[in-house]
Image (cartoon, coloured by chain):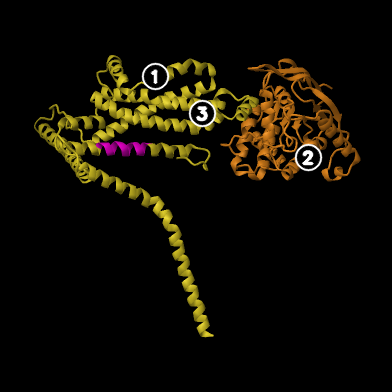
Chain colours: A yellow, B orange
């Protein structure tokens, strides 16, 4: 009897362990799929890059591999920290000097001069992000309403479509001189709130990135389910109610597809515009490094390339999250 | 008393091959509180008649007069129950009805009255338990119930139903028909319903309007259904009078208006496909 009981318990134990093992085995592919596959592809990429880079010799020395680029990333960060410390020290010095002056003569005029150090890599990243978001928001503010009215009215669509199709393929590099001239002619102020360079970049981004949103919103609005249009007609919904209750919700998926393309284009355009116009931002950083031509320049440009790519990725992810949060169909697969 | 008058209505659609005459001289007068079914083969223009009454289409000749006024645009006094429910998928059942109620009763009902009215209509179709559910979370029959509640909540003079139960399975359909009988007994609405289902037509209608085949479809025969209400489908199944009405409609459809070019299953399959055929038939 007792041996039988022990046998049964033993069997149970083994069975338990086996099921756990089986679970682990069956889960393993999922974990591998989610983390392993991307990790593996990244590793292969780094190895191929490292191997090929060693083969290429440029006038600026050997093409940097992953390790050199990582080194420069750290250097750029160190430079940023150093620059910030300098700035803090600069203001502290001024304050001390001012305090001394005031001690001697309470009526003395004191001034705090702004720090004029060179913007670091991270400053340039921030400038670019702020610029692209500004340009993109301006573009969306124009593109979404224009897309909605074009989708609702065939007449307006016919009127605006030739203009949209003509301006859509224009390169940012063609817009830039025109924008620059117009901004310097129109934006005149003694105490400008924004730098001209910032406005130039933002407007160029806006001009280049509003088209996909306009076109997608138009298509989304004009392809609303006919029955829903009939519901709106039977209810005699007003124009605004129709737009907000029926048109907008049903065109959200198409609209967001357009917005995501727009933001992607805007980000690419911005880097090119900054490079050409020497406006502050990542594009200028790349150009400056290229002109600088030190042995580290290529590695520093590659850091910028990765930063540009990762920020683009991040911006798209942000749009995706926004789409998920405003989308009414929570079961839809959005990618 | 003339409540709704469809007078000499003809409808032509422009096609690349020249005008296509869908309807010719459709004449029909409907009294207040009457339940009329339109029955006919696919492509005979039933939906076109309904859309003209709804104001969604404009008749090429002739017109529709409701309570002495000509119909020339859609409006909530002619509420439509669409075949595929047509609820806004981003709104809950309650909000879908609310959209209609706010539109119709803004100014004449207070917010609290509107809330009660929305709930009352959802209760009428037995959907009060799923008020806060979105259309994707409820079954096809329940969606159609909400669609009916939305239409009823507008207090229309005429309720237009375009194959309201066509997309539902047989059991759900029977259930919905019973609900409609119950609602009709309480509210006594004027109803025009399109159907492909002979049983449904006989069970629900005061009159069945049988339409000839298109092109140039028109009213073929009108069959008054003189069965006492409330009607019960199980009792009627053995009723001689009921079966005679059924036979009458079947004879019209399959002997006098036999559709030669139609797909053999068309009259059996009352699903969405049939409806699309209907629309394509008009467009072609």
Q: Callout 2: few (<14), some (14-19), or many (20+) C-alpha neighbours within 10 Å?
A: some
* Mark closer to the observer (2, 3): 3
Residue B257 image point, x, y percent: 81, 28
Crowd band around label 3 with a 10 angstrom C-alpha radius: few (<14), some (14–19), many (20+): many
For the question of whether residue B153 can be seen, the reply is no
Q: Is residue A230 left or right of residue B4?
A: left
Q: Is A146 above or below relative to A289?
A: above
The residue at 67%/43% (across/down) is B128
Q: Nearer the viewer, residue B147 or A303?
A: A303
Numbered circles on residues, count: 3
Gap between marks 3 and 1, in whole Å?
A: 21 Å
The label number, if any, that marks residue A167 in the structure image: 1
* On-image quarter of the N terminus of chain B: top right
1 vs 2, front mark: 1
Residue that label 2 marks: B182
Q: Are marks 1 and 2 on the same chain?
A: no
Where disc 2 sits, the SS reads: helix
Please provide percent x and percent y for residue A271: 29, 29
* Disc 2 with disc 3 on a shared chain: no
Q: Quadrant of residue B154?
A: top right
Q: Which mark is residue A220?
A: 3
Which residue extends farthest bottom? Answer: A1
In the picture, measured across the screen, residue A294 lies left or right of residue A280, that is left
Which residue is located at x 82 percent, y 24 percent?
B220
In this view, B42 is above or below B131: above
Q: Is residue A304 left or right of residue B231?
A: left
Which percent across, then down, holds residue B110? 64, 31
Question: In what element is the residue under mark 1?
Answer: helix
Q: Confirm whether residue B146 shows in the render.
A: yes
Element on which disc 3 rests: helix
The range drawn in magenta is A304-315
Q: Is residue B73 above or below residue B162?
A: above
């Amino acid at each position: 009897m007792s041996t039988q009981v022990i046998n049964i318990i033993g069997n149970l134990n083994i069975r338990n362990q086996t099921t756990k093992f089986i679970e682990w085995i069956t889960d393993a592919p999922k974990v591998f799929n989610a983390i392993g596959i991307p990790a593996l592809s990244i590793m292969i990429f780094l190895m191929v890059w490292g191997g090929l880079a060693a083969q290429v010799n440029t006038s600026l020395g050997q093409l940097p591999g992953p390790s050199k680029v990582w080194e420069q990333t750290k250097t750029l960060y160190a430079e940023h920290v150093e620059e910030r410390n300098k700035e803090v020290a600069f203001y502290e010095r001024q304050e001390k000097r001012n305090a001394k002056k005031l001690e001697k003569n309470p009526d003395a005029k004191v001034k705090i001069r702004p720090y004029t150090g060179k913007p670091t890599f991270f400053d340039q990243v921030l400038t670019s992000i702020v610029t692209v978001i500004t340009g993109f928001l301006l573009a969306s503010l124009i593109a979404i309403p224009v897309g909605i009215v074009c989708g609702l009215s065939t007449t307006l669509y016919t009127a605006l479509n030739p203009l949209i199709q003509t301006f859509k393929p224009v390169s940012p590099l063609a817009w830039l001189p025109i924008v620059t001239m117009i901004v310097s002619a129109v934006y005149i102020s003694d105490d400008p709130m924004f730098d001209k360079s910032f406005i130039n970049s933002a407007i160029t981004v806006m001009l280049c990135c509003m088209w996909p949103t306009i076109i997608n919103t138009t298509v989304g609005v004009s392809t609303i389910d006919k029955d829903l249009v009939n519901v709106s007609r039977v209810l005699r919904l007003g124009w605004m109610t129709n737009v907000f209750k029926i048109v907008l919700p049903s065109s959200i998926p198409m609209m967001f597809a357009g917005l995501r393309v727009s933001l992607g284009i805007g980000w690419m355009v911005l880097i090119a515009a900054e490079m050409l116009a020497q406006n502050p931002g990542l594009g200028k950083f790349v150009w400056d490094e290229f002109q600088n031509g030190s042995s580290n320049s290529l590695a520093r440009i590659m850091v910028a390339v990765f930063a540009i790519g990762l920020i683009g990725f991040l911006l798209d992810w942000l749009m995706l999250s926004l789409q998920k949060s405003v989308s009414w169909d929570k079961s839809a697969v959005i990618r | 008393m003339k409540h709704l008058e469809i007078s000499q209505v003809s409808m032509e659609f422009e096609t690349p091959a020249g005008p296509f005459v869908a309807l010719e001289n459709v004449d029909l007068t409907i009294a207040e509180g009457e339940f009329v079914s339109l029955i006919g083969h696919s492509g005979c223009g039933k939906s076109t008649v309904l859309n003209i009454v709804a104001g969604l289409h404009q008749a090429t000749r002739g017109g529709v007069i409701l309570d002495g006024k000509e119909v020339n645009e859609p409006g909530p006094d002619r509420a439509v129950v669409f075949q595929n429910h047509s609820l806004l998928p981003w709104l809950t059942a309650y909000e879908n009805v609310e959209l209609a109620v706010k539109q119709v009763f803004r100014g004449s009902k207070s917010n609290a009255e509107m809330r009660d009215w929305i709930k009352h209509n959802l209760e009428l179709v037995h959907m009060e338990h799923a008020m806060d559910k979105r259309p994707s979370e409820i079954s096809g029959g329940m969606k159609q119930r909400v669609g009916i509640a939305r239409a009823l909540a507008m207090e229309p003079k005429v309720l237009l139903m375009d194959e309201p139960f066509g997309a539902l399975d047989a059991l759900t359909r029977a259930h919905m028909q019973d609900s409609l009988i119950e609602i009709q007994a309480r509210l006594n609405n004027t109803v025009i319903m399109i159907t492909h289902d002979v049983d449904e037509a006989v069970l629900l209608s005061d009159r069945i309007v049988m339409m000839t085949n298109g092109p140039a479809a028109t009213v073929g025969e009108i069959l008054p259904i003189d069965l006492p209400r409330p009607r019960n489908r199980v009792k009627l199944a053995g009723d001689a009078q009921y079966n005679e009405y059924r036979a009458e409609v079947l004879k019209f459809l399959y002997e006098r208006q036999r559709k030669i070019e139609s797909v053999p299953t068309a009259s059996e399959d009352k699903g969405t496909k049939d409806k699309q055929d209907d629309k394509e038939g008009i467009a072609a």
